[in-house]
Amino acid sequence: MRYDFDRVVDRRGTNCVKYDFAEEYHMSEDMIPMWVADMDWQVPVQVQESLEAVVRHGIMGYSDGKDSYFQAVSGWMAAYHNWHVEQEWMVRTPGIVFAVATAVKAFTKEGDGVMIQTPVYYPFGQMIEANGRVVVDNTLREENGRYTMDFEDMDRKLASGHVKVFILCNPHNPVGRVWTGEELRRLGEICLRHGVTIVSDEIHHDFVFPGHKHVVLAGMDERFLDITVTCTAPSKTFNIAGLQASNIFIANPGLRTAFEEEIRKTGYSSLNRMALAACESAYLYGRDWLDQLLVYLKGNLDFARDYISREIPGVKLTEPEGTYLLWLDCRELGLNHEELENLMVRDARLWLDGGKMFGESGCGFQRVNMACPRKVLEEALARLAGAVKALPAKS
């Protein structure tokens, strides 16, 4: 491999949320932080060079994307996701959560229902409630370590007419499902039948493990395209989340106009110059880096799967089909939520995301970010194994 993903890069002292805010979050400095979903690797050298060129120029005035920016983004979507987009569909935002919140405000009114599928990325529920809308939970079904959609529950709840927007997470964070074309088609048909707009968060679309394929919902059917807001970003793929660049595709002119009008209400206008440069160079020149990273992540997954099954009794890996997140089922340990948190924080000295924050159906789980050098993952799992083995024997 031409890139050294085993190298540990010290992120402390850089105002890094993941490493530099232990005190603010009431965590100890000796903990291994594996909570925030960014990666512990430097961005591709071409991205670094594009940012260095901007800095050398020295003027950080107002900027916007030209045709070359769209060509880079659309070329990536066509080449790697078999989806051909039009330039007029694109709306740039400073993040996908911002875009999802904008869509909720644009397509619903206070008191309307917005459907999510828990356990799911927790800002969705927080943002819905903060805007005076109602969370309607279409809880995922879990059986033998695999999650599926509950279509009967979905159809019944959408039939009420109360739900106006459905937020899809694909690949799903945190359970790691990469929804199949069959599942997406069934979802799309239900939303069409009940007049529900789909907001599809596809930020993890470039992280799919062998044997699985990411399918763009809006690319499956012209009817789905007409009701879907597709949210994409280079931020997870190339570890540039801090630059805040997202590309949102809305083919329906009415939906797009409403979305853009909601953005105008915030006073936001365009991405910053660094974000524009990083996104364009990443999509043009970053594929080789990503291909090698995917191989390394698969190695991390294989290591984690083997280690957990051999060394950590009572903990099971929910096999991920995509993302770089591990969803650990700790329910066999017989601990309540507080006890499980104490095990991770106090005994294992691991800073993870407790499953309950993703919804009540996440109780008993922990989310682990494995996008780190192997030695860090090894140490984290060894700490977890030691803490679990030190638990008092069940009576």
Image (tube, rainbow, N blue to C red):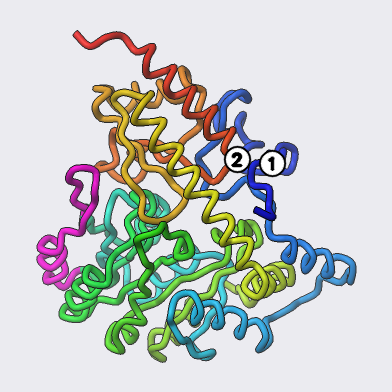
Q: Residue furthest front?
A: 1
Compared across the picture, whether 52 is left or right of 235 comes to right
- Secondary element under disc 2, as helix, strand or loop, is loop
Label disc, if present, on residue 373 of the rendered structure: 2
Residue at position x 35%, y 72% from top?
215
Is label 2 in contact with label 1 (beta carbons under 8 Å)? yes
Q: Which residue is mark 1?
A: 7
Q: Nearer the viewer, residue 323 or 117?
A: 323
* Residue at image coords 30%, 76%: 197
170 up-or-down from 9: above or below? below
What residue lies at 61% left-to-right and 85% top-to-bottom? 71
Numbered tag placed on residue 16 in the rendering? none
Asked if the magenta segment contains residue 261, the reply would be no
- Gap between marks 2 and 1, in whole Å? 6 Å
Q: Position of residue 199 (x, y in %)?
A: 36, 71
Q: Which residues are magenta?
A: 139-162
